[in-house]
Amino acid sequence: MRVLLIKTSSLGDVVHALPALTDAHQAHPNIRFDWVVEESLVDIPGWHPAVDRTIPIASRRWRREPWALAVDGRRLWHALRGRRYDLVLDAQGLIKSALLSVIAHGRRYGLARDSAREPLAAWVYHHGISIDRNQHAIDRLRQLFAAALRYPAPQTDVDYGISHDRVGSALHPVSGNYLLFLHGTAWPSKHWPESYWRELIRLANNDDFLVLLPSGNALEKARAERLTADNPRAQALPALGLSALAGLLADAAGAVAVDTGLGHLAAAVAAPCVSIYGATDPGLTGTRAPRQHHLVADFPCAPCLRRRCNYSGEATVSPACYTTVPPAKVWGTLQPSLKRRK
């Protein structure tokens, strides 16, 4: 059986789809997937043994460079039309992903109108599947795959299907015990205060851990350099691809993350991790794996689900809700789960 999977973004959402592929592979050992995904995330499908081909799209780049769509669109059209599929599964539930499914040859499956993020997308599917919205994103995807591919919805633990030899490694090996602090995130309201990061780095150094801080853009790089300035036991990493980061996380003693896609990557490669939530709630989209810990702000306006904090009262840090998730609490939560090299 050959299936075209459309799950284009974002990083966390794409990682969430991996357990459903594992389920499908176990139910149908001969199943093979082609996966349509955003070009910045093309490493991820290749980590799973059930994926044969990755078809990149560049919707984010096209918004900045609309002239590139002419060339890229022709390539994408031929890639989607080049095979006949037993089933085309849109796991994104957006109008743009539904339109991609129309181009491909095969019976189209996706979320029904009462379940899709954009209900109009459901009009183009041959089969719309209703999935309860009030459950974790990973569970919803596992149920969607099971219904589309006709096997019982699994009740087993989450298995991302990633083996260490499928992910990359760092540009150079890191010796000794090290931690990754995943400080970058899109919303200003999700940023843990820099003073807290500095204190957490000090606590980790005192326990003989090297601290590595990755970054994905110029602002994150500048923050990482500020946090590691004049500290030989803390390093701002150069720009790394997802495979290199996954390899680093797989070998790390542990990690600390804000609400960011890299936190889900840590879960997928079984890195012990504390994820910090202030403006957002981990209930439906939090990290899911053994040794994953969620620390949620206990504050009157949390979770506010706002991109920017609008709290106007007195507080020692900003966003104010993080006063309830101080560095000592984070370190005390992470310590018992850490993997130390002998």
Image (spheres, grey):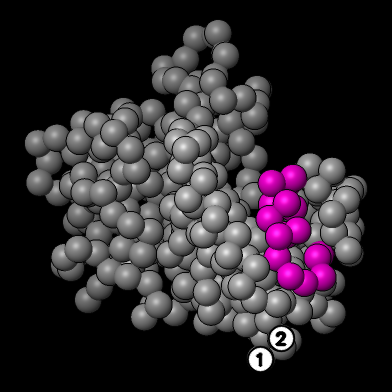
The quadrant where residue 273 appears: bottom left
* Apparent side of residue 101 relative to residue 12 in the rendered image (left or right): right
Whole-percent x, y for residue 338 in the image: 37, 63
Amino acid type indicated by mark 2: Met
Query: Which quadrant does the C terminus fall into?
Result: bottom left
- For label 1, the residue is 30
Q: Tell which of 90 and 234 is nearer to you.
A: 90
Residue contact at pointers 1 and 2, CB within 8 angstroms: yes
Name the mark nearer the viewer: 1 or 2.
2
Q: CA distance from mark 1 to mark 2?
A: 6 Å
- On residue 1, the disc is 2
Whole-percent x, y for residue 215 in the image: 31, 43
Q: Residue at x 18, y 68 (%)?
A: 173
Amino acid type indicated by mark 1: Asn
Q: Which residues are magenta?
A: 94-109
Q: Residue at x 47, y 72 (%)?
A: 46
Q: Is residue 332 visible?
A: no
Whole-percent x, y for residue 23 in the image: 69, 78
